[in-house]
Image (cartoon, grey):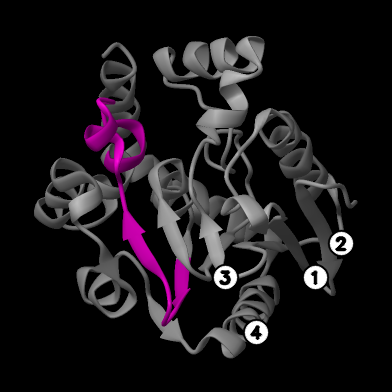
Amino acid sequence: MQNEVLLVERRGPVGWLVFNRPERGNAMNAAMMAELPRAWARLEGDGEVAAIVVTGAGSVFQTGLDVAQLAAEPAALREMSRRTKRAEPGLTGWHLGVTKPIITAVNGVCAGGGLHFVADSDIVIASSTAAFLDSHVSVGQVSALETIGLARRAAFGPVARMALAGRHERVGAERARRLGWVGEVFEPEDLRPAAQRLAELVAANDRRALAATKRALWQSLESGLRDARGAAGEQ
């Protein structure tokens, strides 16, 4: 499937979901937010896909909501606000109950709402050009759902520092690796081939065992994670 905001394709047993608004930092507009649940459902329902890779087109991974575009579409902005208040953004595989292993390949800047896809993936790798930041507090917004998810799977202190420093704190790829936010760092031209190889290694295993293992790992976090995110949505 291909459209102007998302690319969804299969390469062997690996499904790829690619944010495709490079001219806007791959920010999520109304069309992308509407398409993401359908894209995830397509990959989840494809019997040939055993693992999924998420990445961005161009030199940026994902920069969160396209606030300027959403401001021109009040209905879309209201819908996103409703989802946030209910702690149900409906953007990532975790939000939507995808059972297949998900590998996120961060190919550049990952900011704000883009952190959802890092926090909610099973495995994260990154380009040496990747950088992580969260500018919510710098524009008078609460940093909550994304950073809560990230803090639950990595060291709390650095996540809190990034969230509270806003646009003034940028975490590079190597530091993110040392903090455990990403597992490996590759040169930009090597990132997608590395993601494909890793996904194929995962996909070679028994699919029922993969789904059960993923479910067990996330269940070790989800009770507290859901409670925390629900509270954050009330802010």
Q: Earlier in the sequence, mark 3 or mark 2?
A: 2
User: Is-magenta flag for residue 122?
Assistant: no
Graded by Cα atoms within 10 Å as few (under 14), some (14 to 19) or many (20 or more), the crowding at tag 1 reads many
The reply to whether callout 2 and callout 4 are in contact (CB within 8 Å) is no
Q: Which residue is mark 3?
A: 59
Q: Identity of the amino acid at label 4?
A: Arg
How far apart marks 4 and 1 lie (CA) works out to 11 Å
Single out the mark in the foreground, 3 or 1: 3
How far apart marks 3 and 1 lie (CA) works out to 26 Å
Q: Which residue is mark 4?
A: 197
Residue at x 22% of width, y 76% of height:
178
The reply to whether callout 2 and callout 1 are in contact (CB within 8 Å) is yes
Horizontal side, residue 14 vs residue 110: left or right: right
> 95 or 111: nearer the eye?
111
Where is residue 101 shown, x and y percent of the image? 59, 59
Q: Identity of the amino acid at label 2?
A: Glu
Q: Which residues are magenta?
A: 124-147
Q: Is residue 93 above or below residue 182?
A: above
Q: Earlier in the sequence, mark 4 or mark 1?
A: 1
